[in-house]
Image (spheres, rainbow, N blue to C red):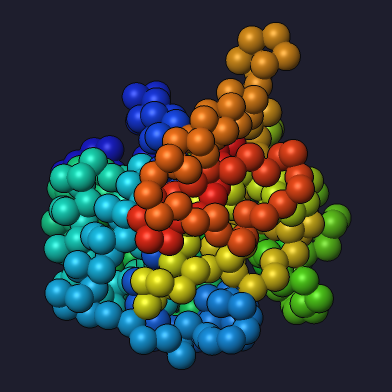
C-alpha cells in the first residue's frame, strides 16, 4: 500500500515544483467534474444547482463522456494545463471507476497528484491505494442522524464497508442542524479519528449562494462556535487538519474571488470537459462572505505566513505569478479569460496553456 495516500498537503519538494510550474505560467490546480451522473440527491448540492454553470445549462444537461473518450479527454485537459494537482469530482466520480482505474496511473506517471472526491456509495478499488500520488477523499456530512438522511444511499454502513482496506481522507461539511446539539462536532471527529482507514479529517462549513435562505446555512455566531470547537478538537484528535490560522480564516473568509487564493490558483471544468465552473468549484454566485471551503481557508491562512521580516508567502507567490503571466503571454494562441478581468491590485494574473488560456494566481 502506498503509505503517502491520503496526506493532506504536499512536501516542500512538491511545493517547489508547484512554484516552478507557476513561474512558467502553468495551472497549479485543476478540478474536473468527470461525470454528470450521481445516484444521490443531496439537499444543497452545489453541483446540481440551476446556476452552477452560469444559468444557461445545468450539469445534468451537459453531454459527458465514458470509456476511451473520457480517459483521453481528461488526459488532454491535464496535458494542456500541466497542473501539480488534479481533483476528480462529479457527480459521483466512482460511477466512472473503470475509466478512473486507467486515468489515475497515467496521471501518476505524469507526476501529477490526483484526488478522487467521492461519497463512497460505490466500493473504492483497493488497487488505487498502490498508485503513487493518488488520494481518495470521502464526503461524510455529519453523524448518521443527519448524513444518512441527506446522502442516502451512501449511508454510514455502506461507507464503512466500501472504504475497508483503503486509506482515505474524510471531508465533512458543517450545517446548521449539526450545531444545535452541544458536542456534535467532537463526536463526529472522534468517530472518524479512530477509524484505521482514515488518514486525515478536513472540515468545511456550508457555503451558500448569494441570496440563499436554507436550513443548512450557519449564522455568524455559529461560524464562530464551529471555528472554536474545531480548534479545540485538534488538541485531542491528531487526524483533524486545523490550526489557529485556519480557524481565523473560517471566522473571516476571503470576501471575493479576487481575494481567494484557491479561486485564483485553480481551473475548473465540468463534465463535457470544456464548460468552465466559475468563479470557483462552487460555481454560480457563491456568497464569499459565508464561505466555509476547507481549502480556501487553508490557503487564506498560508498566504499570511511571514517568511522574513514583513515578507509574507503571498508577496513571494504573487511575484512568481506576475512572472508566470509574462511567460504565458509569450506562448502562441494566448487569450485572456474574461473571468480574470479585474482592476484589483490583488488580482495578479497567470496565463494558462493550450487553446483555452485563462489567468490565475498562486496564494
Q: In the rendering, at what x and y percent does residue 276 appear?
A: 49, 69
**Residue 333 sits above or below residue 311 on the image:** below
Looking at the picture, tell me which residue is in the foreground, 193 or 12: 12
Looking at the picture, tell me which residue is in the foreground, 95 or 1: 95
Q: Is residue 319 visible?
A: yes
Looking at the picture, tell me which residue is in the foreground, 75 or 302: 75
Q: Report which quarter residue 311 is drawn in.
A: top right
Q: Residue at x 23, y 73 (%)?
A: 70
Q: Report which quarter residue 160 is drawn in.
A: bottom left
Q: Residue furthest bottom?
A: 61
Q: In this image, 282 relative to 63: left or right?
A: right
Which corner quadrant holds the N terminus? top left
Q: Residue furthest top?
A: 309
Q: Residue at x 58, y 27 (%)?
A: 319
Q: Residue furthest right?
A: 221
Q: Report which quarter residue 56 is drawn in.
A: bottom right
Which corner quadrant holds the C terminus? top right
Q: In the rendering, at what x and y percent does residue 297 appear?
A: 64, 45
**Residue 338 sits above or below residue 151 on the image:** above
Q: In this image, 316 relative to 163: left or right?
A: right
Q: In the rendering, at what x and y percent does residue 170 appear?
A: 44, 55
**Residue 65 sits above or below residue 256 on the image:** below
Q: Residue at x 46, y 90 (%)?
A: 61
Q: Is residue 157 visible?
A: no
Q: Residue at x 64, y 73 (%)?
A: 284
Amino acid at each position: 500500500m502506498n503509505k503517502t495516500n491520503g496526506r493532506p498537503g504536499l512536501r516542500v519538494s512538491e511545493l517547489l515544483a508547484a512554484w516552478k510550474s507557476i513561474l512558467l505560467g502553468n495551472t497549479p490546480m485543476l478540478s474536473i467534474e468527470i461525470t454528470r451522473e450521481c445516484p444521490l440527491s443531496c439537499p444543497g448540492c452545489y453541483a446540481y444547482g440551476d446556476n452552477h454553470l452560469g444559468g444557461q445549462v445545468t450539469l445534468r444537461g451537459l453531454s459527458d463522456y465514458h470509456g476511451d473518450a473520457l480517459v483521453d479527454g481528461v488526459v488532454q485537459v491535464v496535458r494542456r494545463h500541466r497542473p501539480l494537482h488534479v481533483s476528480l469530482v462529479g457527480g459521483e466520480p466512482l460511477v466512472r471507476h473503470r475509466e478512473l482505474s486507467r486515468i489515475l496511473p497515467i496521471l501518476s506517471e505524469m507526476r501529477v497528484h490526483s484526488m478522487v472526491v467521492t461519497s463512497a456509495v460505490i466500493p473504492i478499488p483497493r488497487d488505487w491505494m498502490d498508485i503513487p500520488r493518488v488520494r481518495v477523499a470521502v464526503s461524510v456530512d455529519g453523524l448518521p442522524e443527519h448524513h444518512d438522511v441527506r446522502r442516502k444511499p451512501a449511508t454510514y454502513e455502506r461507507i464503512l464497508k466500501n472504504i475497508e482496506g483503503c486509506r482515505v481522507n474524510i471531508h465533512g461539511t458543517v450545517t446548521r442542524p449539526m450545531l444545535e446539539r452541544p458536542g456534535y462536532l467532537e463526536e463526529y471527529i472522534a468517530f472518524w479519528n479512530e477509524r484505521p482507514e482514515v488518514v486525515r479529517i478536513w472540515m468545511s462549513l456550508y457555503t451558500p449562494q448569494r441570496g440563499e435562505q436554507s436550513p443548512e446555512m450557519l449564522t455568524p455566531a455559529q461560524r464562530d462556535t464551529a471555528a472554536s470547537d474545531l480548534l479545540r478538537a485538534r488538541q485531542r484528535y491528531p487526524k483533524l487538519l486545523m490550526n489557529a490560522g485556519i480557524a481565523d480564516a473560517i471566522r473571516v473568509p476571503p470576501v471575493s474571488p479576487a481575494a481567494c487564493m484557491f479561486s485564483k490558483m485553480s481551473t475548473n471544468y465540468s463534465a463535457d470537459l470544456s464548460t468552465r465552473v466559475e468563479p470557483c468549484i462552487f460555481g454560480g454566485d457563491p456568497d464569499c462572505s459565508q464561505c466555509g471551503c476547507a481549502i480556501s481557508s487553508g490557503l487564506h491562512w498560508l498566504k499570511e505566513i511571514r517568511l522574513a521580516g514583513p515578507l509574507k508567502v503571498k508577496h513571494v507567490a504573487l511575484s512568481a505569478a506576475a512572472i508566470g503571466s509574462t511567460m504565458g503571454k509569450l506562448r502562441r494562441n494566448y487569450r485572456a479569460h474574461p473571468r480574470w478581468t479585474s482592476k484589483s491590485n490583488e488580482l495578479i494574473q497567470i496565463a494558462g496553456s493550450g487553446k483555452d488560456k485563462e489567468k490565475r494566481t498562486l496564494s
